[in-house]
Image (cartoon, helix red, strand yellow):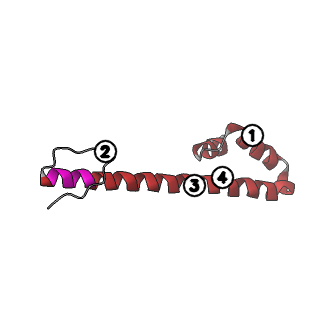
């Protein structure tokens, strides 16, 4: 059960988890297939991390935009705008 929860926590689908467990039950004959599954799941996790980093960077950029707007007393701050404010 611990393995199922660990795999589920990584975002692996229940169908994939079942397949992985079925392969585990086959023993050493399925090691390469299990390795492929883990590699694929790692790639998915890395893509999610990269997407999260991009989202974080957008938010950090917008945060700095708002800080600058407040600092210079800008009154017309719009989300999609990327204006430079006069210091």
- On the image, the x and y values in percent for residue 66 come to 24, 50
- On the image, the x and y values in percent for residue 45 come to 58, 53
- Of circles 2 and 3, the one toward us is 2
Q: How far apart are marks 1 and 4 (CA)?
A: 14 Å
**Which residue matches tag 1?**
18
State whether the magenta stretch is mostly helix, strand or loop.
helix
Where, quadrant-wise, is the C terminus in this rendering?
bottom left
Circle number at residue 41: 4
Circle number at residue 79: 2
Q: How far apart are marks 2 and 4 (CA)?
A: 35 Å
- Of circles 2 and 4, the one toward us is 2
Residue 30 colored magenta?
no
Near mark 4 (Cα within 10 A), the count class, few <14, some 14-19 or many ≥20, is some
Residue lying at the far bottom in this picture: please name it.
Answer: 87
Near mark 1 (Cα within 10 A), the count class, few <14, some 14-19 or many ≥20, is few
Q: What element carries label 2?
A: loop
Q: In this view, does 85 lie to the left or right of 45?
A: left
Q: Which of marks 2 and 4 is nearer the N terminus?
A: 4
**Which residue matches tag 3?**
47
């Amino acid at each position: 059960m611990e393995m199922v929860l660990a795999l589920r926590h990584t975002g692996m689908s229940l169908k994939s988890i079942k397949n992985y467990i079925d392969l585990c039950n086959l023993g050493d004959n399925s090691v390469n297939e299990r390795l492929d599954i883990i590699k694929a799941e790692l790639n998915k996790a890395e893509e999610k991390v990269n997407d999260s980093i991009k989202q974080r960077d957008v938010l950090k950029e917008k945060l700095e935009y708002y800080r600058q707007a407040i600092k210079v007393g800008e009154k017309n701050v719009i989300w999609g705008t990327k204006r430079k404010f006069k210091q």
